[in-house]
Amino acid sequence: MASLEVSRSPRRSRRELEVRSPRQNKYSVLLPTYNERENLPLIVWLLVKSFSESGINYEIIIIDDGSPDGTRDVAEQLEKIYGSDRILLRPREKKLGLGTAYIHGMKHATGNYIIIMDADLSHHPKFIPEFIRKQKEGNFDIVSGTRYKGNGGVYGWDLKRKIISDGVLPYCPGWSLLGSSSDPPILASWDYSRGANFLTQILLRPGASDLTGSFRLYRKEVLEKLIEKCVSKGYVFQMEMIVRARQLNYTIGEVPISFVDRVYGESKLGGNEIVSFLKGLLTLFATT
């Protein structure tokens, strides 16, 4: 009787299995919201369309921080329309910070990859399949969207804001010469901009081209570890995430994206956030 020879394949690491078996991957999108009732239906529709057309397994977790404009009501309707297996509303009573919003969202995430993005249509979901391809190609721990590399860019800003974002003009008492007296100070537009990014690159040299952006893909366990290590709050949080990732030797890939200024609603960025950004930047410079 001929003997049967059974070949046993060697054990593969978790990362190898993820790369070889992409259909088993699931992507959880975390959408922190505050006063985004006009934008939320559009961004959710675009996300569902992008994932469905690409055959990607997904869920969208909406973390609303007590929006007074009815964002939560809109999210509840979207949950009914698309199903609670795809849209999960996990609200909080008030604004508690971006980092804690991610922690709250991850508690309910069933995907092995986490995608973070803005809910105000500044980030187009059409780039997500490219994020996923990039992650698979390089087996990266993180894939970050960048406005400052390749064909990436910023659109929808007027000349004044572009000048400000490039870091050409500092804050000065004569800022109103570039606009009406009701306009915010020049420095208030620096965050999420080339100016803030430029300062960060000089002081921290993180090895990534866009630190202040918030359109990224993470391995779930990597994001959990980074949030555990990060101490910053507000807008500086995104910057610290990349700095800590380099410290922990996580690999980072980048995909050029188009950042489009919000169509509906008002920016959440104000003077307090700018002060916090500068304080956080100096703290990271002194401690990393």
Image (tube, grey):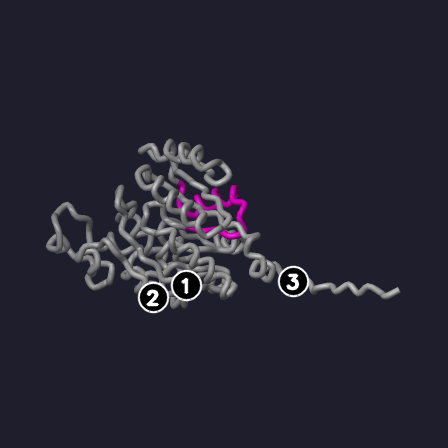
Tag 1: amino acid: Glu
Q: Which type of secondary structure does the marked residue at label 1 adopt?
A: strand
Mark 2 crowd level (few <14, some 14–19, many ≥20, 10 Å Cα)? some
Q: Residue 243: which quarter of the image? A: bottom left
Residue 109 lies in the magenta-colored region? yes
**Of callouts 2 and 1, the N-terminal one:** 2
Q: Which type of secondary structure does the marked residue at label 2 adopt?
A: loop
Whether pointer 2 and pointer 1 mark residues with C-beta atoms closer than 8 Å, the reply is yes
**Of callouts 3 and 1, the N-terminal one:** 3
Per the image, the residue denoted by label 3 is: 12
Tag 3: amino acid: Arg
Check residue 254 in the rendering and tell me which mark sits there, or answer none.
1
Quadrant of the snapshot with the N terminus: bottom right
Residue 256: % across, % down: 36, 62
Specify the segment rendered in magenta: 96-116
Residue 7 lies in the magenta-colored region? no
> Does residue 262 lie above or below 283 as drawn?
above
